[in-house]
Image: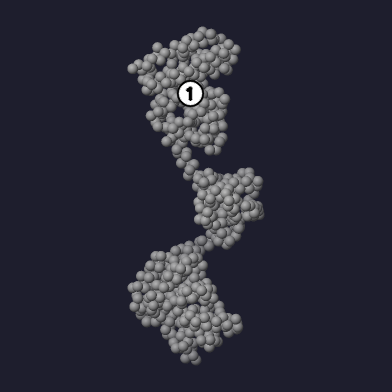
Amino acid sequence: MLDISLLAQKLDFEEEDVVMLLEMFIESSQQSIKLLRKALETSDFPAIKEHAHSIKGSASNLLLDEIYQLSRSIEEASITQSPFDYATAYTKLYHALNNIKITETV
Amino acid sequence: MAKILIVDDLAVNRMTIKLSLKSEGYEFVEASNGLEAIQIAKDHNPDIILIDAMMPVMDGFEATKVIRKIEEIQRIPILMITSLESKEDKIKALNCGVNDFISKSFDKSELKARCHAYIELANLNKKYILATKNIISNLPNKMKLLKDIQNSKISKSLFLIEMDNFDDNENFYGLSIAENLEKIFIKYLIKHCLILHDHYQLYHIASGKYAILFNETFDNNEDNAENFCANLISSIKHHNFQYQDYNFDINITMSYMYGLENLYEDANTMLNLAQKDKLEFMVDTKRINQLKNNIKENLETLKTIKMALNEDKIEPFYQPIYNNHTDSINRYEALIRMHDKNGKIIFPHPVFLNVAKQGKLYPYVTRLLIEKVLNKIREEGCEISINISSLDIEDKIMQAFILDAFEKNKDITHKLIVELLEDKETNSYDEVNKFIRILKGYGIKIAIDDFGSGYSNFIRIVEFEPDIIKIDGSLICDIATSQASRQTVETVKIFADKIGAKVVAEYVENEEIFNIIKSLGIDYAQGYYIGKAEPTIRKTALFKKSLEVV
């Protein structure tokens, strides 16, 4: 559960703006996560990097720490192509993205 | 309002930036990849560009590289929004032409501060570009030309080109057609220059005026420069410039100069000279030295005149005008004479007068003449004629001064004669005619000087209703030997009788001429045979005195 009020305070945005940004993020990251999965299945490293990077950027802007850390670890591993447990990281990321629940505080 | 282009493939990221800058009142345009960004930058000319590094289609690095090569947008500050952590990537970005970075996740106040700083920089850039560009053609302007010459360490070849009568086009067709004509003309110039040489810069230095500055590739010699001018002039002459339904024949004047110091000034002096002499071009660089000497001499002459004015060393001399009917002298022509430092008299020959006119000292000389002559009339009770040029009449301040002096002395103005001198720059005969009417109101007599040139247009003479016609000296000089001169003088006399004017013969230098003009019924004689111009008035003719001596 995200504390919109706290996030708005940290970002120095209006709460309604934070809600809008999060909604936009959820929409675009759903797209990215699908593409990431496809890339993982085919071991297409450049594509893995691209989609992980894309999630990472927005997550970092919105201070979504867990999502940022997970996507970053996937991106870095794809660059170095070192042994890495993509499946676990992917699953965690997938759940983290799906767990974003926006509840506006009144 | 400042405009920011935000480039990111994700809408959420673009929105985050927009919201962060919400309070700043910027206008935003957006692009989702590098390729789009280039087009939008061209269309919207933003003040700054915030660009993501990694994007599909074209990334931020590549887009920056391309933007830096496009003349109209290459100066826009570009900030890269990035989580680029590696030093190599940052250096790569800087090498592509990125000015600065904004890190993800960005701090809102830092983002604001950076945008603000780079928008300021963009404004300064724009001001500089505006100051160095001609707004019609977007070509570098005169300021830029002077700077480029100043920054050059080697001598360069400079051509100046000016459309003849461009102002007339502007007045006749209106500004917007004239501007479009310039644009068409510039296109033609660029095309022409391209064929000839590669390394040059074209400048738009004023309305209808252009400069071509070559670097060392142009072989500096006069033949070469002459060919370049002749080619360009002739191709322009034979080209039909068309805008809308209008056809324009364009003629140009050109000058060429090679050098470093005062390159533009010298080329411009040459251009003026070419225009004055009605030449199509001037490439003779030796002329510039000659001209510089002239300028020096002119300045010397001006100094002498100024000094003479200040020290009261300018005074009228009086040349007697002999009345052939009464065999007496009661009329004089006042002629300006000037002393130099040593008290030697310098005659105001044409050079002197021209310099005085161009140096705007002529009105002072005329003022002095009028004041002194009016005093002389008051002292001596004789009639005196003064020369007033059409330039004096057109000069409103001068005219006011003259009329004021006449008003203050109206008890004696009937003894004053004004000899009208035509100046080749006169353009308003109506003004002269109006002035004559006022003079006549003061009882001042009007004389037409040098009949045989200038005002001696019969219609004009009749309009001016002169009291006196002075026959041009060249006709009197050879009246004893030339049948034609004699017949002309006879005709002038008949004409003068018809319009009720008296006739004065100038240049009466000897007894023979004197007797002829007397026999022709000419009313007055003036010349060395009667007397030279002297500081005091001569009451007896010189020839009478010499008779007495004999």
Instruction: From the top left corner, tell me how far across and down residue B429 is, in percent.
Output: 47, 68
Front residue of this view, candidates B154 and B104: B104
Circle 1 SS class: helix
Three-letter residue code for mark 1: Ala
Write the residue at 58% across / 11% down.
A41
Position in image of residue B414 (x %, y %): 38, 79
Left or right: B467 as drawn, with respect to A6: right
* Residue most extreme to the front: B245
Q: Is residue B471 above or below residue B242?
A: below
Q: Is residue B156 above or below residue B485?
A: above
Q: Looking at the image, is B194 positioned above or below residue B42?
A: below
Closer to us: B370 or B58: B58
Callout 1 crowding tier (Cα within 10 Å): few <14, some 14–19, many ≥20: some
Residue shown at the point (45%, 39%) measured from the top left? B124
Residue B51: image location, x then y, percent: 50, 27
The chain letter for the residue carrying disc 1 is B
**Residue B438 location, x and y as percent?**
40, 72
Name the image colouring.
one colour
> In which quadrant of the rendered view does residue B476 lie?
bottom right
Left or right of B93: which side holds B191? right
Q: Which residue in the structure is indicated by mark 1?
A: B11
Q: Is residue B229 above or below residue B431?
A: above
